[in-house]
Image: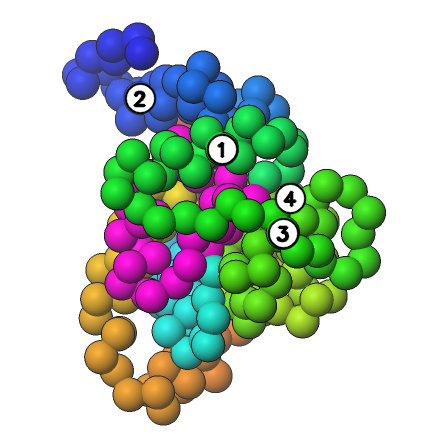
Amino acid sequence: MTHVPENHPRYLSLKYREIIAEGVRRGITAIEGMTAHGRGETFDYILGEKTHDFAFEAERAAVALMLLSRHPVISVNGNTAALVPKEIIELSEVLSAVLEVNIFHFSEERVRNIKEYIESFGGKILADLDAELKGLTSARRMVSSKGILIADTVMVPLEDGDRCEILKTNGKKTITIDLNPLSRTSRMADITIVDNIIRAIPNMIKIAEELKDYPKKELEEILARYDNKKILNRSIIAIRDYLTEKATEVMS
Ligand code: ATP
C-alpha cells in the first residue's frame, strides 16, 4: 500500500483511497467500487466531511431499530469490508446482528475473499447463498437462509437502489448509509444515514453501547419521533448551505 504522509492536508481522504485500491488488489472490492467511493467522496466534500446532526439522528434511529428487531442483519459488500472491517464486526456484536456477505458485482471468489478477510479480524460472517429472494432473476437474489432470508431488518450500507427495493418488497425494513441523499437507495430506505461509513459505524457502536440497556418502550419512542423524509430534506439543505458559504468565501 502506498504510504500517505500524515501531515498531508488531504491525509484521511488519501488514506481511504489507498485502502479501497488495496481492497481491489486483494480481490475484496470490485473495480466499480472505486467509482462508487469517488461519488461518496464528492458528497462528503460538499457536506464539509463531518457528521451532521441529521446523520447522528438517523444513526440513533438505526440503532434503535436494529435493537428492536428480531433478526437484524448487516449486509457487507466489498467497499464496506475494505473500509471498516473491524468496526463492522464490533457493531454486529453490540447489536447481536448477523453479518452477511452480499455483493452487487457477483463472483464466488470475491464472496470467499470478503468472508476470509472479515474472519481474519475474528468476525463471524455468513456467505452461504443457499436461499432466494422473491422477485429477482439475477445472481443478486441469492442470500443466506440463516441471514437476509429470515431478517426483519437489513442494514445495506453503500448500496444501489435495486437491492434496497428488493429487500423492501420482501417485507424487510431497510437502513442505509449513503453520502448521496439524492440516490435511489437514500430515497427508498426506511432510515438513511447521510454520513461517511468511516464515521457512521464508530458513531453507531457508541450509540449501541448506550441504547442496548434501554427499555423497549424508549427505543420505540426514538423510532416514532423519526421522520426519514425530514432527514433527507435537512441533508440536501445542508449541502446547499455549505456551498453558499463556500461561494461567499471565494469572493472575500
Ligand atoms: P442508487 O442506485 O441508489 O441511485 P448508485 O447507483 O449511486 O445509487 P452505487 O454506485 O452502488 O449506487 O453507489 C453507492 C453509494 O454509496 C453512492 O451513492 C455513494 O455516494 C455512496 N458511498 C460511497 N462511499 C461511501 C462512504 N464511504 N460512505 C457513505 N456512502 C458512500
Q: CA distance from mark 3 to mark 1?
A: 14 Å
The extreme top residue here reads 2
Amino acid type of disc 3? Asp
**Which element carries disc 4, helix, strand or loop?**
loop
- Compared with residue 29, is residue 22 higher up or lower down, i.e. above or below? above
Answer with left or right where residue 107 lies relative to residue 112.
right
Please name the residue shown 42% across and 59% down the image: 98
Local crowd at mark 3 within 10 Å, few (<14), some, or many (≥20)? Answer: few
Q: CA distance from mark 2 to mark 3?
A: 36 Å
Q: Which residues are magenta?
A: 74-102
Where is mark 1, residue-wise? 112
- Residue 239 — which label? none
User: In the image, which is nearer the foreground, mark 2 or mark 1?
Assistant: 1
Q: CA distance from mark 2 to mark 1?
A: 25 Å
Q: Residue 51: x, y in percent?
A: 34, 49
**In this orientation, which residue lies closer to the viewer: 131 or 64?**
131
The answer to which of marks 2 and 3 sits earlier in the sequence is 2
Q: CA distance from mark 1 to mark 4?
A: 21 Å
Quadrant where the image shows the N terminus: top left
Answer with left or right where residue 179 lies relative to residue 168.
left
Q: CA distance from mark 4 to mark 2?
A: 24 Å
Label pair 3/1, CB-CB below 8 angstroms: no
Where is mark 3, residue-wise? 130
User: In the image, which is nearer the foreground, mark 1 or mark 4?
Assistant: 1
Where is mark 2, residue-wise? 15
